[in-house]
Image (spheres, rainbow, N blue to C red):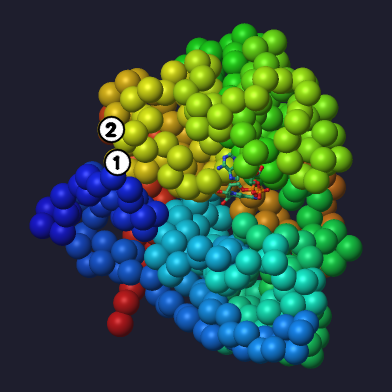
């Protein structure tokens, strides 16, 4: 089809190009009508704001903030807000589109969005971060809303920032609106099970893929990059299901123990060691990049974007990659991985457990009711399992990778919804 451009073969890709590359392939296989392709490739709305904030020393600094609404075809848009010095509009655009596909894959009635503020929260006081967060909510007064666009935490933000966002939005509305953000503290309407939700979804999709590949979890060796929210919960849950986690890593490097790492010990060590694994005594230290090349059954990248590239894809020695992180595999590595017979459970499926439980949080807020943790886990496990099966079946039917199948599932759903709703 004329609108499918050639594959970008470059040394380093930006996340938006990686997203567009897979989107183009899936659209082509689906035979997506060109008009709908054009609607879905362009974000609905891109908001850039400048926020003057008084710093603790009395000076005024101007911060730049973004919110990109990629789509609200399936429902109000949903997506986190990232506080990071390297945030760019292109990155936020890619992350917003990923949210659209992710919500569609797990069949949640949301569109996709993402936000970001160019700042270094590690060099700011709590007061400065609070003023910046409130300024962002004021600047986005006409963007956010429980029926319009619902933010959540991402890199550099957490429960504390979500509480400020909810409070600021509520002050402006004159009533408490708890459903305007998710990822809040439990006392303010946060959901039980949200902390481990993404890692739990990673575990469920890993076990589903292992079943298809006939890998016995009890005889499996697992390597996990990143030991934050996603990585550490995934590690703990994989260990609970019988896997041997032989290597973990964080910003300080990789930690290997061929006999299996005791994950609870590693979590306790990290929690009492300023949040990192530096000096973890129950494993040998290796270079963080080498961790990805360890021979194993399952590799779970759960830290950063673009860690698997054309430079290391050919040297991976795993049977299965489950993408806990968003965008850990650059599009130009897909072909090498596929050629080597490695199965990839893509990010838009593997880490969708987080947004699934965020949706449950929003539902509970709107009902004014709280569900038990068991109910949350049971429902999210069911969604993750059935989404995996749907993606797997599409992959079999069209003889494509799970990644392209997941994009096909999402794009097809959104395209159908769009054709019912119609344009101008
Ligand atoms: P986090 O900040 O809790 O943890 C990140 C971890 O990665 C930390 O252990 C950090 O030390 C480590 N890390 C940073 N740089 C590294 C490097 N160069 N090598 C190895 N490790 C490194 O973040 P998180 O919430 O666990 O998110 C991780 C990834 O998962 C991100 O891509 C995020 O977008 C994605 N994700 C998170 C959620 C969620 O619910 N938290 C949901 C979906 C996707």
Image x and y of residue 39, in percent: 30, 69
Question: In the image, is residue 236 above or below residue 423?
Answer: above
Quickly name the residue at label 2.
Answer: 335
Q: Identify which residue, 22 or 421, lies in the foreground.
A: 22
Badge 2 local density, few (<14 within 10 Å), some, or many (20+)? some
Cα separation between marks 1 and 2: 7 Å
Quarter-of-image position of residue 162: bottom right
Residue pictured at 38% horizontal, 30% vertical:
312
Q: Identify which residue, 114 or 1, lies in the foreground.
A: 114
Please state if 38 lies on the left or on the right of 252 as rendered. Answer: left
Residue pictured at 10% horizontal, 57% vertical:
2
Q: Are marks 1 and 2 in contact (CB under 8 Å)?
A: yes
Quickly name the residue at label 1.
Answer: 332
Image x and y of residue 123, in percent: 70, 66
Please state if 369 lies on the left or on the right of 277 as rendered. Answer: right
Residue pictured at 53% horizontal, 23% vertical:
298
Instruction: Find out if the beta carbon at label 1 lies less than 8 Å from the nearest ligand 1 atom.
Output: no
């Amino acid at each position: 089809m004329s609108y499918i451009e050639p594959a970008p073969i470059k040394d380093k890709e930006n996340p938006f190009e990686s997203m567009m590359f897979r989107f183009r392939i899936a659209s082509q296989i689906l035979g997506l009508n060109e008009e709908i392709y054009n609607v879905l490739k362009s974000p609905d709305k891109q908001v850039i704001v400048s926020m003057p904030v008084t710093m603790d020393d009395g000076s005024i600094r101007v911060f730049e903030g973004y919110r990109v609404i990629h789509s609200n075809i399936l429902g109000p848009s949903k997506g986190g807000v990232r506080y990071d010095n390297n945030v760019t509009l292109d990155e936020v655009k890619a992350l917003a589109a990923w949210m659209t596909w992710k919500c569609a894959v797990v069949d949640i009635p949301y569109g996709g969005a993402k936000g970001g503020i160019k700042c270094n929260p590690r060099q700011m006081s709590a007061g400065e971060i609070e003023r910046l967060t409130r300024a962002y909510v004021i600047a986005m007064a006409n963007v956010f809303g429980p029926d319009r666009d619902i933010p959540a935490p991402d890199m550099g933000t957490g429960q504390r920032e979500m509480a400020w966002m909810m409070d600021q939005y509520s002050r402006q509305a004159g009533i408490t609106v708890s459903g305007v953000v998710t990822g809040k503290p439990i006392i303010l309407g946060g959901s039980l099970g949200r902390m481990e939700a993404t890692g739990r979804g990673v575990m469920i999709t890993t076990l589903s893929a292992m079943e298809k590949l006939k890998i016995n979890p009890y005889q499996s060796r697992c390597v996990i990059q990143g030991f934050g929210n996603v990585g550490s919960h995934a590690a703990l849950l994989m260990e609970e299901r019988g896997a041997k986690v032989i290597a973990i890593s964080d910003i300080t490097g990789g930690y290997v123990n061929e006999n299996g790492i005791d994950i609870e010990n590693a979590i306790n060590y990290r929690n009492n060691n300023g949040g990192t694994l530096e000096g973890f005594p129950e494993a040998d230290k290796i270079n963080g990049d080498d961790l990805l090349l360890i021979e194993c059954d399952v590799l779970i990248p759960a830290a950063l974007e673009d860690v698997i590239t054309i430079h290391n894809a050919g040297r991976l020695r795993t049977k299965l990659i489950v993408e806990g992180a968003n965008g850990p595999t650059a599009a130009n590595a897909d072909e090498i991985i596929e050629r080597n017979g490695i199965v990839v459970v893509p990010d838009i499926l593997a880490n969708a457990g987080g947004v699934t439980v965020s949706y449950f949080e929003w539902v509970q807020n709107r009902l004014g009711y709280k569900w038990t943790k068991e109910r949350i886990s049971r429902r999210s496990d069911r969604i993750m399992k059935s989404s995996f099966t749907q993606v797997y079946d599409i992959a079999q039917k069209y003889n494509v990778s799970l990644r392209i199948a997941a994009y096909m599932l999402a794009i097809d759903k959104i395209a159908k919804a769009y054709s019912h709703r119609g344009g101008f």
